[in-house]
Image: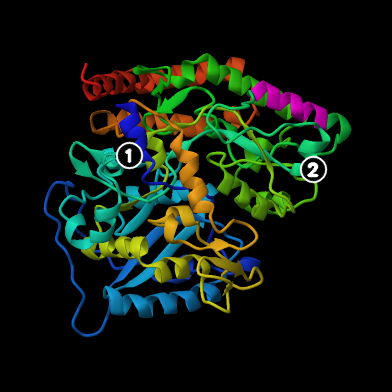
Amino acid sequence: MKGKLKRALSAALVITLLGSTLLTGCGGSPTAGNTSSETSASDSSAADSSEAVEVKTPADDGVYPTLTWYMPGDPTVITSEGYEAVSKVLNDYLEEKIGCHLELKIYAFSEYDQKCSTVISAGEHYDLMFTCDWINNFSTNAGSNAYLSLNDLLAANAPEAMADIPEYMWQATTINGNIYAMPALQVYAKNDGVFMRKDIAEEFGVKGSSYDNGVDKYTLEELGDIYAQIKVKYPDVIPDDCGGVFWTYLDEANDFNYLSGFDVPGVVRFTDEGTVINQFKSDEFMNYCKTVYDWVKRGYLQPDFASYVTQTDQLALDRMSPDHMTYRAGFTAPNVAAMAKTICGWEEEPVPIILSDKYAVTSGVTQSLTAIGINSDYPDLAVKLYNLAYSDEWFVNTMIYGIEDVNYTKNSDTEVTVNKESNYAAPLATFAIANQFITWVQQGASEPDQWEKAKAFCEDATPSELFGYIFDSSSVQNEVANCAAIYTEYRYPLLCGAVDPETTIPQMLDRMEKAGADKIIEEMQKQIDEFLGK
């Protein structure tokens, strides 16, 4: 069974490249999201996703409906003028292709969670929204009726995506028979680790890990030993990348398969996928918090790490510093090494320090999804728009790179050079828009055959027994929301080393237990038993 699953999994892929876009333009210019008018919304309340949805259609007077698409991004590489120019080109094309306009609503990664939460809570009328298991939690939102069921919309409006994307990927976005999101074709295998600048790795005798599964792995303690050596010779340098809460980059390293995102109690171990545990009660969680608490004191992490992780602009600047030595992303693969080289301005491809085995897991699919809002006025068009981004090479690459000979230069059929001084300098992440494998790569930063290498990276991943399972939180949505809110309160101070874990973790656990953590675990266990046929 595992062999068959592995062969099936190797047919589709994706890579988790962290991308970019607009909240404010360069020099503090407002973004299009802040200067454009909101899509008109009716006063009707959200309906149950299983009920029929009233679909608005374009008027016959030449006025095209405007669809809104929420995405996370980088606020430093685009201005409102750049956005408007690219938007004009895209909308002219959309008028001809599917009869609509597009308004991108793109916010910094550090603000995206809160923005989407506000939009969803207010019942706003939006059309498409990036969602996943690591930001803007998919299963929680789907379980609380934030997203529209797509079962009756996909066949007619997304024929190319339906024909290409394997069934198991659609299963990973299905809850109680309802498909609540459209997956991006991407790399599904996941591992954990960091990349180290090649000259620093050579200086300190760090042997790079193999991309083959389980070969030449390191432990978190061994990574700390390397950082210690760096601090001795370069006491003023921060050796860690500091790009995000480190805990969320260590799920496979901790032997954890997350069932509902990082903010909700409930994981299984890869060594025992039939038993649900509360990760916040685990030794791994305590040990991690102690380690980060110690690393801040030792100077391996930024002294203000708990606030630094929210400073997207500062991180982007620091990564280009000649003192910056490491980089981490959602997984450690050859194409991500190329991304690290670009983002950090390194001259040579960095050395991988891999901290875990490699697994094919549901979160490999749910790490990049597009959902349709429950109150969308144009759900049919929204699905058509996703399908166009999935299948139309020119359209999706114009979204990413802008206007040829203005924002980028085309060097070959698959390679571009981005004009980083332009007002639309590759502001969107290729991983977030439907089908990464028709996107172009940046020459010199990525190899032309990087998608083939990405496929090879996935081939030896160990399939999870729970691949395709996704938690249905509908019966415990209040408990999930309350526990997630508690996690959010403790996330930065506790997981970024600002408070003593010995005293803080018991406080957090006590509050989560009162909020219903045990009830969530019980419901997860029931669903896992059913999924595994117990």
Image point (63%, 57%), residue name:
445
Q: Is residue 4 magenta?
A: no
**Segment tinted magenta in the rendering:** 220-230
Residue at point 36%, 45% (across, down): 11
Residue located at (17% from left, 61% from top)? 156
- Does label 1 or label 2 sit earlier along the sequence? 1
Tell me residue 92's x, y (percent).
37, 80
Q: Amino acid at mark 1?
A: Ala
SS at circle 2: helix
Horizontal placement of 187 versus 314: left or right? left
Residue at which label 2 appears: 199
Question: Which residue: 29% across, 73% down?
Answer: 100
Pointer 1 local density, CA inside 10 Å: few below 14, some 14–19, many at least 20: some
Q: Amino acid at mark 2?
A: Asp
Label 2, residues with CA under 10 Å away: few <14, some 14-19, many ≥20 = some
Placement of 370 over or under 438, stated as above or below: above
Q: Mark 1 = which residue?
A: 8
**The C terminus - image quarter:** top left
Q: Residue furthest right?
A: 233
Q: Front-most of 106 and 534?
A: 534
